Image: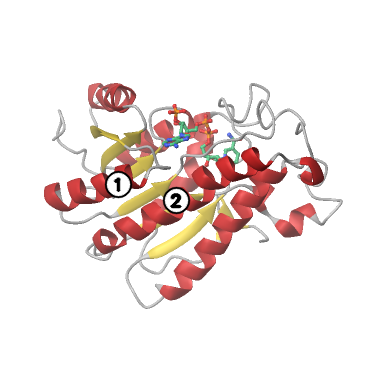
Amino acid sequence: MSDTEATAGPLAGKLALVTGGARGIGLEISRQLAALGAEVLIAARHKAKADRAAALLCKEGYAAQGLRLDVAFEDDRQDVYHELRRAHGRLDILINNAAIYLDSKNAATPAIKLASGTPKGTLRTTFETNFFAPIFLTQALLPLLRKSPAGRIVNLSSIQGSLAYHADPASPVYSHKAFAYDASKTALNAFTVQLAEELRDTRIKVNSVHPGWVRTKMGGDVADLSVQEGARTAVIYASLPDDGPTGGFFHLNERLPW
Ligand SMILES: NC(=O)c1ccc[n+]([C@@H]2O[C@H](COP(=O)([O-])OP(=O)(O)OC[C@H]3O[C@@H](n4cnc5c(N)ncnc54)[C@H](OP(=O)(O)O)[C@@H]3O)[C@@H](O)[C@H]2O)c1
């Protein structure tokens, strides 16, 4: 399984899966969950990259394993379900982190085209990865999350998905519109709300989080936060106590408008 024993900590004994976990915010979420004691499955579309990232965490003394998962492929999603069912029989934490940003080079640069001119391919490809993939993966893994004593689903959203912010000239995103990416995160937020309501009487909590503007390939070099800071919000909502919130949209402890 992993090269090291899980660290003792509040997440000791928990199994977490992080999509797009081999770099950027996903890698740091994996590290911070592992530092709290979770065994982390680092999922990436290239197995070698997933294994390298897992080996890095194992070297740091954590429990991690690489998993091949291109979130956009149904076969990969089904393979992961069958592998988890076989090896663990349950999943405690699902972090839907993998995403793409095709509207421009990165979030620091203006979109090449605004809503009226966004190319069909940009919209379709963005929705495939940022919207359909986390939904279909969550649907596939839900039977395993139901087996957990405290299932937690964290959807990496963005304030760029907030309709309230986009309609408010005083908001931080009003003048920064990237239609395909923004709309994919708005739609992901809709999934958070509806799934959380559906699961309200279960032990599973579902939340959307905004990590902040983070220095990664997607965020760009001039972003505000380090990956260490950017991973924090997802980790908080992955490790919520039983009386924690569900169906919300958060940055750190602040509730964000939909
Ligand atoms: N950075 C920010 O400022 C910021 C702000 C708000 C929200 N977010 C959100 O935070 C999350 C992480 O962002 P990030 O900044 O770390 O982005 P990033 O540096 O661009 O990393 C994206 C990750 O997603 C993976 N990925 C993309 N398509 C995939 C697919 N089809 N299957 C599996 N993995 C795939 C990438 O894997 P490869 O290495 O294979 O490409 C990579 O690991 C995203 O959901 C993003 O929307 C980021």
Q: Is residue 91 visible?
A: yes
Q: Position of residue 192 (x, y in %)?
A: 51, 62
User: On the picture, is 68 further left or further right than 73?
Assistant: left
Q: Residue at x 64, y 21 (%)?
A: 221
Mark 1: give few (<14), some (14-19) or many (20+) Cα within 10 Å. many
Question: Considering the numbered disc 1 on the image, is that residue within a helix, a strand or a loop?
Answer: strand
* Residue that numbered label 1 is attached to: 16
| In-front residue for pair 2/7 | 2
Q: Residue furthest front?
A: 120
Which numbered marker is on residue 134?
2
Q: Residue at x 68, y 23 (%)?
A: 222
| In-front residue for pair 5/129 | 129
Q: Quadrant of residue 34?
A: top left
Q: Is residue 15 visible?
A: no
User: On the picture, is 110 further left or further right than 98?
Assistant: right
Mark 2: which amino acid?
Pro
Q: Residue at x 68, y 35 (%)?
A: 103
Mark 1: which amino acid?
Ala
Q: Position of residue 209 (x, y in %)?
A: 54, 51
Q: Position of residue 81 (x, y in %)?
A: 25, 51
Quarter of the picture holding the C terminus:
bottom right
Mark 2: give few (<14), some (14-19) or many (20+) Cα within 10 Å. many
Question: Considering the numbered disc 2 on the image, is that residue within a helix, a strand or a loop?
Answer: helix
Q: Nearer the viewer, mark 2 or mark 1?
A: 2
Quarter of the picture holding the N terminus:
top left
| In-front residue for pair 21/255 | 21
Label 2 near ligand 1 (CB < 8 Å): no
- How are the residues colored? secondary structure
